[in-house]
């Protein structure tokens, strides 16, 4: 009996919907990255994209701990001299809340063409509405214990 290896034709990708309301950003991002990679599946393979699609709603209501709301900065550059731009977390949350979760998850995926294929399966929406009802997404498979902590 040999070692089983999943074939590309045998891969089944499900759809999940995750509610980010009240969730802590880093913990939420690591759970999403795990599902996008397919690490929860028995057919997980490092060289194939066996992960599932994830739809995130309420991205504008994600939380961070400590003073990160004021201290966390996002860097980007226009590739022109002097074209660097720093944006605070609170400003990014007010203008582009979807980008916060996308960048957090992207940092936890592989830095190659497989990672670029995985991030395309992530759909993020600021509000509660999303256009993926036809895919019949199931509730997100959280780890033991919810990600939120009491207080704050």
Image (cartoon, helix red, strand yellow):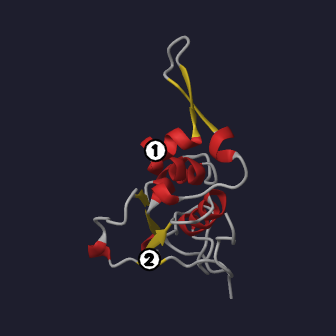
Using the image as rendered, state which of residue 45 and residue 115 is in the foreground.
115
Above or below, 124 against 151 in this view is: above
Tag in front: 2 or 1: 1
Q: Are marks 2 and 1 in contact (CB under 8 Å)?
A: no
Q: Position of residue 6 (x, y in %)?
A: 55, 75
Q: Earlier in the sequence, mark 2 or mark 1?
A: 2
Using the image as rendered, state which of residue 98 and residue 93 is in the foreground.
93
Q: Which mark is residue 79?
A: none
Query: Circle 2: is it few (<14), some (14-19), or many (20+) Cα within 10 Å?
Result: few
Report the residue that reaches farthest toward the front: 152
Looking at the rendered image, the quarter that the N terminus falls into is: bottom right
Tell me the element at label 2.
loop
Q: Position of residue 109 (x, y in %)?
A: 61, 54
Report the residue that reaches farthest toward the top: 81
Above or below, 59 against 145 in this view is: above
Per the image, the residue denoted by label 2 is: 12
Tell me the element at label 1.
helix
Figure quadrant of residue 122: bottom left
Per the image, the residue denoted by label 1 is: 94
Q: Residue at x 61, y 76 (%)?
A: 40
């Amino acid at each position: 009996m040999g070692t089983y290896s999943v074939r590309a034709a045998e891969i089944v990708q499900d759809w999940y919907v995750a509610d980010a309301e009240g969730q802590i950003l880093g913990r939420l991002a690591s759970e999403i990255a795990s599902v996008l990679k397919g690490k929860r599946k028995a057919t997980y393979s490092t060289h194939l994209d066996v992960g599932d699609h994830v739809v995130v709603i309420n991205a504008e209501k994600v939380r961070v701990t400590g003073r990160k709301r004021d201290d966390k900065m996002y860097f980007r550059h226009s590739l022109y001299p002097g074209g660097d731009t720093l944006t605070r977390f609170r400003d990014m949350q007010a203008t582009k809340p979807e980008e916060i979760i996308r960048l957090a998850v992207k940092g936890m995926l592989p830095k190659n063409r497989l990672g670029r294929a995985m991030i395309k399966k992530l759909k993020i929406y600021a509000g509660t509405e999303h256009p993926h009802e036809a895919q019949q997404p199931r509730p997100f498979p959280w780890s033991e214990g919810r990600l939120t902590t009491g207080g704050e």
